[in-house]
Image (tube, rainbow, N blue to C red):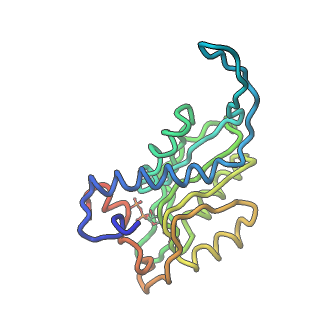
Amino acid sequence: MGLLRDQRTDPKKFRELMREIASLLAYEATADLATEEVTITTPLGQVSGRRLCERVGLVPILRAGLGLVEGFWNLMPNAEVWHIGLFRDQRTLQPVAYYNRLPVSPTVDVCMVLDPMLATGGSAVAAVDILKEWGASRIKFVGVIAAPEGIQRFTSAHPDVPVYLAAVDERLDEMGFIVPGLGDAGDRMFGTG
Ligand code: PRP
């Protein structure tokens, strides 16, 4: 997390760190998913193992959420990915939806909403609103850094959605940025800052 926050970290390193942190968060966020017993044949005999039996959908919020997808795919390469495009209006701080190609009805059992930053919480709340309207029954939110204000707003709006985070920072500044945070995750990831 220290390297990710460091202003000297370049986009290549930033993406690598985001991927590593996502893998660690994925471990936590998937710990309670249902598994079923399977029999494995080794060169010397048989042994029972366990296999994930829930269909997982990864829902990165564009753009910065894309940085968390690879880390989850390391653990579950067959997870479907459904993108939701939201950006935060810099003046009003309200989320604006610009991309949504979800199929007519849910194709997965569990949706993992991915977005590294939970600032005011507006984008995360809007993404979960969209998924609930779609008919998703089980949703989790996975972020990297949150402000206490964002957690409060999100858990009030969606108390049924568990939140997995790597760090909770001090506060939001007057521009709605997380302090000390890491700056703008999307810009740092894609080199557009
Ligand atoms: C950032 C971030 C979240 C959102 C968080 O995205 O990645 O999606 O803002 O803010 P909120 O909790 O106050 O809604 P941004 O709008 O900068 O878009 P980007 O990912 O395309 O850079």
The vertical placement of 132 against 42, above or below, is: below
Q: Which residue corresponds to the image point at 41% horizontal and 81% vertical from the top-left?
A: 175
What x and y, as percent, mark residue 17? 37, 55
Please state the horizontal and vertical placement of residue 182, each as a whole percent of the image. 37, 71
- Outermost residue on the front side: it is 44
Give the residue furthest to the bottom.
174
Using residue 54 as the reference point, say whether residue 99 is left or right of it: left
Q: Using residue 48 as the reference point, say whether residue 154 is left or right of it.
A: left
Residue 96, percent from left and from top: 49, 62
Residue at point 70%, 28% (across, down):
49
Q: Is 57 rendered above or below residue 168?
A: above
| 107 lies left or right of 178 | right
Residue situated in front as seen by the camera: 29 or 57: 29
Quarter of the rendering containing residue 180: bottom left
Nearest the camera: 84 or 191? Answer: 191
**Total number of numbered labels?**
0
| Quadrant assignment for the C terminus | bottom left
Camera-nearest residue between 46 and 100: 46
- Look at 59% across and 41% down and name the residue there: 102
Q: Quadrant of ligand 1?
A: bottom left
Q: How far across and down, in percent of the image, does residue 86 sit?
A: 48, 58
Give the residue displayed 27% in from the left and 71% down from the top. 7
Q: Quadrant of the N terminus?
A: bottom left
Of the pair 41 and 26, the residue shown nearer to us: 41
